[in-house]
Image (cartoon, grey):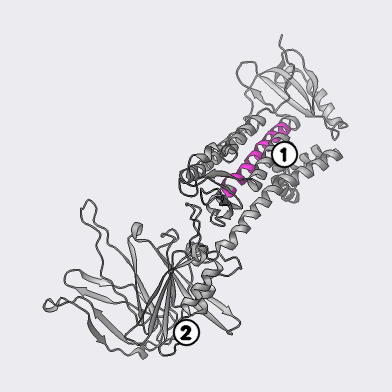
Amino acid sequence: MTISFVGLCWKGGDGRKHLFVGIDDAMQIRLRAPSNVFGHPTDQSLVDIDQQLSQWDHDNSAPVTKVVFGHFPMAFTTSTEKGKHPEGIFAKHNISAYVCGHLHTKFGKHLYNHRRLVFPEYKQVREFWEWEMGDWRVSQMMRVMATDNGHTSFVDVELIPPKENSDQEFVMPTIILPTFPLNSLTMLQVEEISMRLIDYNSGISGESGPYYYDAVWNSAEYADDSPSWYRLEIILEEKEKGITLSEPRPFSVNGHVGNFRLAWLGYLGMGFRWEKLYPFLLWGMVAFVFSMLIVPKVFSFQLEKAGLCEEWVMTVLRPASDFRTMILKLIKVPFWVVFENARNTCIWACSLAYVMSLTFLPWFSGRVLADDFPIGHMSVWGWSVKPSNVISVNQVSGLGVPDIMGIVLPHMYTVLFPLILMVSALSAERAACRHHIGMAGKCHRQSGSKLSQWLLVFPTSEAYRGDASVGSSLKEMMSVPASKSGVVLKERCELQPEGELETLLLNRKLEHQNEYCSLCNRLIRKGLFVGCLAITFLHWQLLSSVTRAYGSTVLVMTPIFAWTVPALIVFSLIQTSPIRPISVAAHEN
């Protein structure tokens, strides 16, 4: 932070001194957007601003009104190396307001925040207002401020746009700024009230200049304990422009201050410090994704070691018999999804390698500084750049934290987390389809000919080798005459062991159409395929924005960040495509 404008001070007609201080707390090494969304003050800059705001503290000849203006809101300003924050300096010096911008109406056109800080050394609460406003370039907005007897008031003015299909320009509206009574919701306090109207251009006898009109009113008639019971609205009638109404504002002649509440969208932009929230959001998601990969793998290893893997899976896939079983199943199913991903070693290993690379390695390289500067490298730990082409200048690391949250968090929450869920769901769908065909005795029709092939799959793990019901059911099925079973055996049935499954392939001709089974026809897989396309699209959108900001080197020099997501999706689709052993013998006469 540097003091970009200091010394705008004067003594007003009310006998008070007025001090305006402007600050620039952008990073000393100027990174390109979107890695420059936070202000980064230093300990020395806070010492400087403290000195500037205290220059008249020992002069008791006249009270001082202090106003600070800067670019970044307090919610988008980081702490210094020693953990200090500018809002502590502002509250310490009892500034009237801190005026800022930066958000460009993305969280609302009129954002205000009443900040209150407790100072134990002073045994009191210090407070100031933070007023953010939209920009002039895009929103055609400006703010008019006034100080009256130490109280700061403001009004936001929006230019009147021209009519459609008109060559006219934007028109400046009539500005009405009441300084007394103060707005009881956006001002600090109210004292004795009087009313004065100032006309800066009356047009009387060709003269121009300020004309004052005083209005006497009995303020005692408006006394009330509520800070917002009465509202003030000024009606101005002009010959050329017609009637202009000021914005209705609550006031309190008793000096009561209302309870100011931010809307939920305004709270996101002004209500809390993103600097403190970013580490929680980042490392919380990293820990959760690692747990989705590591915990099921350990659990699968223990079940395989005890020979209970298939038995546990059947407790998930078996239909619930009562309410308690249904609740337990609802708890087990999400874990079973990631459990099946852990059993698919190839997909699991690729997913783990990708998560580890995002955590410990640079994501991509790009021109985060000017075009003639060396290329920088971004990771979750910040940017590593060399701020000069001079060989003796060392590389600087850890820049742009938490500014990079605009890149890191969208990728973590909209790409990485859904990606792990999707590849896990693909593995789980394949496993569910195999168990459904095997245990329920459902048929999986291979389309393409009049004589359809049907596949029956039976588990042969240790948990079911001694189950006599499976063998008896098989014998009963093979002994049923064709007229009763509704099928005609074309040749013979062979029982062949294939890895963990024994496959019985029957060539038979159906006399009637079979019931349509969404699981056998893998409709769930088709829905997951649509989800994979959505993840790929979101990844491409983020990748395109990063490429526009930092150049095509993002695509060329960092293939892990750019191409791993679509590659892992394609690999998972191929891996989970077959639902039966590699080869099964079936012949027709």
Q: Position of residue 180 (x, y in %)?
A: 35, 82
Mark closer to the chain start, 2 or 1 = 2
| Res. 45 visible in picture | yes
* Front residue of this view, candidates 127 and 334: 127
Image-quadrant location for residue 67: bottom left
Residue stretch rendered in magenta on the structure: 412-436
- For the residue marked with disc 1, what is the amino acid? Glu
Disc 1: which residue: 340
Query: Do the numbered discs 2 and 1 sit on residues whose CB atoms are within 8 Å?
Result: no
* Front residue of this view, candidates 507 and 351: 351
The residue located at (27%, 62%) in the rendering is 160
Disc 2: which residue: 57
Image-quadrant location for residue 112: bottom left
Q: Establish if 368 lies above or below 49.
A: above
The residue located at (65%, 55%) in the rendering is 284
User: Could you give the CA–CA distance between mark 2 and mark 1, rounded to whole angstroms?
Assistant: 69 Å
Q: Is residue 328 left or right of residue 467?
A: left
The residue located at (62%, 46%) in the rendering is 417
Q: Is residue 240 left or right of residue 183?
A: left
Numbered disc 1: secondary structure: helix
Is residue 446 highlighted in magenta?
Answer: no
* Front residue of this view, candidates 9 and 154: 9
Q: Position of residue 251 (x, y in %)?
A: 39, 81
- For the residue marked with disc 2, what is the amino acid? Asp
Q: As drawn, which residue projects farthest toward the left?
A: 205
Q: Is residue 97 left or right of residue 143?
A: right
Is residue 434 highlighted in magenta?
Answer: yes
